[in-house]
Amino acid sequence: MNSQADAGHGTREQGPNRRFWDLLSPAEQAGLQALGQVAQFQPGDTICTEGERTTHMFVLTEGLVKILTAPREHHQITLAFRGPGDIVGELAGSSAGYRIATIMAVSPVRALVVPHDRMSLFLDSNPGAGSAYRQAVTHRWGQAAEMLLSRSVNNGAQRLAGLLLDLADQRGTQARSGTATTIALSQEEIAGLIGVSRATVTRALADWRHQGLITTTRHQITIMSFPGLRRAAGRDLGTPL
């Protein structure tokens, strides 16, 4: 597994992101790797299905997944996206024992699959890892609260720009030049995730294409100007993505 901790300095990653894997020390990462198995998934693969019995969780090291729920037959709602360093599928193991959402690969995904009981013992016996887990979960709930607040204070275009920036950050695929990354998702998924109409998404994307901030193809959005999109989101240009 690739990690920013692989340099062997023994320090935990610091910064605004609180992703579980990145918060572990090299020794903790090695210990967790020994408890699980590496699995790979292709775009469109269902990693786990809502309602099925749960036995394990996933630590993402490469790729992007989306979290889905189906409140009624033939209708799915995208709840969130997760990227490298995130832990997913962990809540079912500490609740009813059944998957509470479906997880699907958006891009090629590599993940460490760890049984719930082994993860629980690992966190109990490694205080640093337990702290990292709590930080990651707390950060995730904070993100959910920020999203709800955003819906009340930002317009649809601002929320859309913020989502695209966050997805680029989660995928970790920003080009070395800092000018482009590709995101694969539909306009319906985007609209549902930020609580706007598809027409709002279509108008904003068309405007940003005209300004040269993005390019689009079927189910793909490429960011051509991160500074421009940050302005559209109303974010501080001095804050790194």
Image (cartoon, helix red, strand yellow):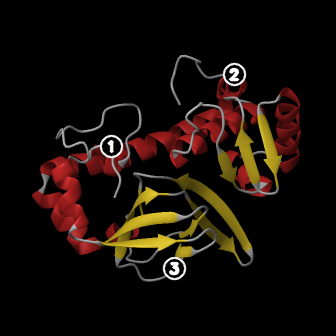
> For the residue labelled by badge 3, is the local secondary structure a helix, a strand or a loop?
loop
Residue 51's tag is 3
User: To which residue does mark 1 refer?
Assistant: 4
Between residue 139 and residue 39, name the one nearer to us: 39
Please name the amino acid that badge 2 sits on: Arg
Pointer 2 or 3: first along the chain? 3
User: To which residue does mark 2 refer?
Assistant: 231
Task: Determine the CA span between mark 3 and mark 1.
Answer: 35 Å
Q: Residue at x 26, y 47 (%)?
A: 6
Q: Residue at x 37, y 77 (%)?
A: 97
- Residue 186, relative to residue 41: is it above or below? above
Residue 57 is left or right of residue 79, and the answer is left
Mark in the foreground, 2 or 3: 2
> For the residue labelled by badge 1, is the local secondary structure a helix, a strand or a loop?
loop
Q: Residue at x 67, y 47 (%)?
A: 182
- Residue 76, relative to residue 21: is it above or below? below
Which residue occupies the extreme bottom position in the image? Answer: 53
Residue 94 is left or right of residue 240, and the answer is left
Crowd rating for badge 2 (residues with CA inside 10 Å; few <14, some 14–19, many 20+)? some
Mark in the foreground, 2 or 1: 1
Please name the amino acid that badge 3 sits on: Gly
Crowd rating for badge 3 (residues with CA inside 10 Å; few <14, some 14–19, many 20+)? some
* Contact check, label 3 and label 1, Cβ < 8 Å: no
Q: Residue at x 21, y 66 (%)?
A: 120
